Amino acid sequence: MKLITAIIREERLDQVREALIAAEITRITVSRVSGHGQQTQELVYRGQTIVPNLIPKVRLDIAVNDAFVDITCDTILRTAKSPDGGKVGDGKIFITHLEQCIRIRTEESGSKAI
């Protein structure tokens, strides 16, 4: 079992979500987050140009069985990337080992709970 965490642009969320559903990845958690890396964004506020320290993003958390790791990552890569080959700020995907998963309702554990 793996936990896939993807940080993507806010405007790409609908396309990514629809593509994941089409790939039969239906159980996702979405959070609004902010952070900063190499991407810069200039805003005009009251006539002055400012560069905010933190840029709004969307975080997807998806727990999958090992067979779905490549499908999930490929789907996110294909749909979260900006047109024309991608841009700085398109996001990142993190894959971590998921030691245990327990479904509260049925008390199932392991890959059955996902």
Image: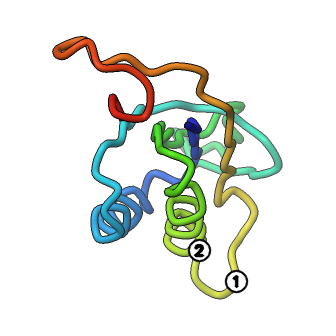
Q: Where does label 2 land, which residue?
A: 82
Kindly indicate the quadrant of the structure image that contains residue 105.
top left
Please tell me how crowded label 2 is: few (under 14), some (14-19), or many (20+) other residues with Cα within 10 Å: some
The quarter in which the C terminus is drawn is top left
**Mark 2, secondary structure of its residue:** loop
Please tell me how crowded label 1 is: few (under 14), some (14-19), or many (20+) other residues with Cα within 10 Å: few
Q: Residue at x 69, y 42 (%)?
A: 94
Q: Residue at x 58, y 32 (%)?
A: 34
Q: Position of residue 88 (x, y in %)?
A: 75, 62
Total marks shown come to: 2
Q: Residue at x 65, y 87 (%)?
A: 84
Q: Position of residue 2 (x, y in %)?
A: 58, 38
Between residue 40 and residue 102, name the one nearer to us.
102
What kind of colouring is applied to the model shown?
Answer: rainbow
Q: Farthest left residue?
A: 105
Q: Position of residue 57 (x, y in %)?
A: 53, 42
Q: Farthest bottom residue?
A: 84
Relative horizontal placement of residue 39, taking residue 74 as reference (left or right): right
Between residue 81 and residue 100, name the one nearer to us.
100
Q: Is residue 18 above or below residue 63?
A: below
Q: Residue at x 53, y 63 (%)?
A: 76
Q: Please, what is the three-letter code of the amino acid marked with disc 1?
A: Gly
Q: Where does label 1 land, which residue?
A: 85
Relative horizontal placement of residue 15, taking residue 40 as reference (left or right): left
Marks 2/1 in contact by CB < 8 Å: the verdict is yes
The quarter in which the N terminus is drawn is top right
Distance of label 2 from label 1 (alpha carbons): 7 Å
Q: Position of residue 110 (x, y in %)?
A: 44, 26
- Give the numbered dot on residue 17: none
**Mark 1, secondary structure of its residue:** loop
Q: Please, what is the three-letter code of the amino acid marked with disc 2?
A: Ser
